[in-house]
Amino acid sequence: MSAKSVLLEPQHLLDPTLEHTLIVVKPDGYARGLTGEILRRIEAKGYTMKGLKLMVASHELLAEHYRDHEGKPFFAGLLDFMSSGPVVAIIVEGQRVVEGMRALMGATDPTTAAAGTIRGDLGRAWNTPHMENLVHGSDSVDSAKREIALWFPEIY
Ligand code: DAT
Ligand code: MG
């Protein structure tokens, strides 16, 4: 009998009565071996992971993902950085999970992000032109829907 891989079908797992957000462990988080620590914090907070994949994101996907930042001086560097290595994309589920994950992540700039947050505890400035802050999280319920559809097209 030949081995057969089974694709988990997330549409059967997402609870439509709950909120969802798109979390991405960025290339710096993956490369530094912090994926487990970041997932641990998400689970310890009480949220549930629904859909998780290791991938290298294309410029095309990232340009759409970050379309609100198009034209800003850091846009090209952001896309180069985000496509520079593997990332882990995760759908996270729970009541008020969008704002809850933003609180768990901390402020954008890792140097000044509050201690106790993912970015504050694990991130810092490096000698790079781009900002490395370990993790992406959707900033609103509407953004989350758009981003989940973009990163997990197999759901729809
Ligand atoms: P966040 O990721 O906290 O939602 P954002 O949406 O404002 O922040 O920006 C998206 C990403 O772009 C951010 O995670 C890191 C990068 N970035 C933001 N502001 C930047 C800046 N002033 N210089 C360099 N990179 C920046
Ligand atoms: Mg943002």
Image (tube, helix red, strand yellow):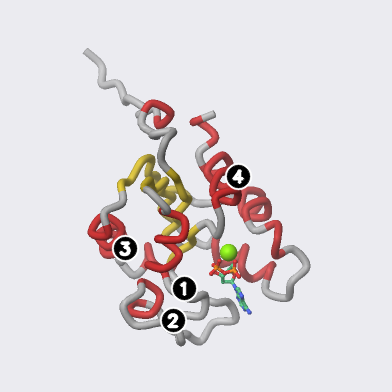
Decide which of tag 4 and tag 1 comes sooner along the chain. Answer: 1
Front-most of 118 and 61?
118
Q: Secondary structure at mark 1?
A: loop
Q: Is mark 3 within 8 Å of ligand 1?
A: no
Q: Quadrant of residue 13?
A: top left
Mark 1 near ligand 1 (CB under 8 Å)?
A: yes
- Name the residue that disc number 3 marks: 38
Q: For mark 2, does the 10 Å Cα neighbourhood hold few (<14), some (14 to 19), or many (20 or more) residues?
A: many
The answer to whether marks 4 and 1 mark residues whose Cβ atoms lie closer than 8 Å is no
Q: Is residue 101 above or below residue 148?
A: below
Discs 4, 2 touching: Cβ within 8 Å:
no
> On the picture, is 53 further left or further right than 136?
left
Label number found at residue 146: 4
Residue behind mark 1:
133
Residues at circles 1 and 2 in contact by the CB criterion of under 8 Å: yes
Q: Ligand 2: which quarter? A: bottom right
Residue lying farthest to the right in this orientation: 71
Q: Is residue 40 left or right of residue 115?
A: left
